[in-house]
Amino acid sequence: MKLLALDTATEVCTVALSLDGEVLERTEPGGQHAERILPMVDALLAEAGLVLSQLDALAFGRGPGSFTGLRIGAGVAQGLAFGADLPVVPVSSLAALAQGQNAVRVLAAFDARMQQVYWGAYVRNAQGIAEVQGIEGVYAPQEIPVPIGENWHGAGPGWDAYHQRLQQQLGPRLAGWQPHCLPQARHVAVLGAAGYRSGMAIAAEAALPVYIRDDVALKQRSRP
C-alpha cells in the first residue's frame, strides 16, 4: 500500500510516505506549517519517484491540537486528495502520539491551554494498533478520567506542562511518563493504513479537523 501521511496538530510539521512498509519521512519543528508542508510533500514524492495519483490514500492528523495547525492540515489534505482523486483517512493526533510509544497502555495528552489538556487513553490491540478506550476529551489535569487497570504510560506536551497534577490524579495506575513527545507522520501512516483496511476512508471534501473543545468548534462552524 502507498499512503501519504501528515500531521500539523502541534509545533512540529511532519510528513511521511509509506510504501508497502518502507517509510520516508520529513519533520520540521518551529511552526510555519503553511509555508513548509507542501514543499515537504513534494520532496518526499520526488525522493520516491512518485506522483500523488500513484498513491492509494492520504491520511492526516485530524486533531485535537492547535486550531490553526488543524485547519492547515485538513485544508492541505483536502486539496491534495481532491486533486489526485484519493480517499482520505482521518487519524486522531492523540492516537498517533500513542502509537509512537513503546508501551501497551498509553495516556496521551496535549496542552489545550486555559489550564486544560486534550486527553485520551489507548491500548494496543493484537495487531499492534493503538485503540482509544472510551472517548477523547478536554479536561483540567486534576479532573481527567482515571482509566481502568494499571501500568499506564504518559506521553505528550500535556504531561510536560502538568505532570505533577496528572500524576496525583492517576496515582499507582501510572507506571511513568515520557517527556518531549509529539506525534509523527510515520505513526499517522500506520493508523491510516489500518483505517483504510477497515473501511474508514472518506471523500476529500469530508476531511475536517476535530477540535474537541466544543465552544471553539461552534465558533468555527458559525463563521460565514
Image: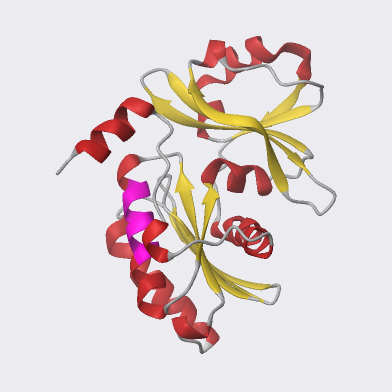
Task: Find out whether residue 26 is within the magenta segment.
Answer: no
**In the image shown, does 104 or 32 lie closer to the viewer?**
104
Q: Residue at x 42, y 39 (%)?
A: 65
**How is the protein colored in the picture?**
secondary structure
**In the image shown, does 71 or 25 lie closer to the viewer?**
71
Quarter of the rendering containing residue 21: bottom right
Please state the extent of the stretch shown in magenta in the rendering. Answer: 69-78
Q: Please identify the dominant SS of the magenta region.
A: helix
Q: Residue at x 67, y 29 (%)?
A: 177
- Counting the numbered discs, the total is 0
Figure quadrant of the C terminus: top left
Task: Determine whether, in the image, residue 42 is placed left or right of residue 56.
Answer: left
Task: Determine whether, in the image, residue 34 is placed left or right of residue 109.
Answer: left
Residue 161 visible? The answer is no
Task: Find out whether residue 71 is within the magenta segment.
Answer: yes
**In the image shown, does 24 or 196 lie closer to the viewer?**
196
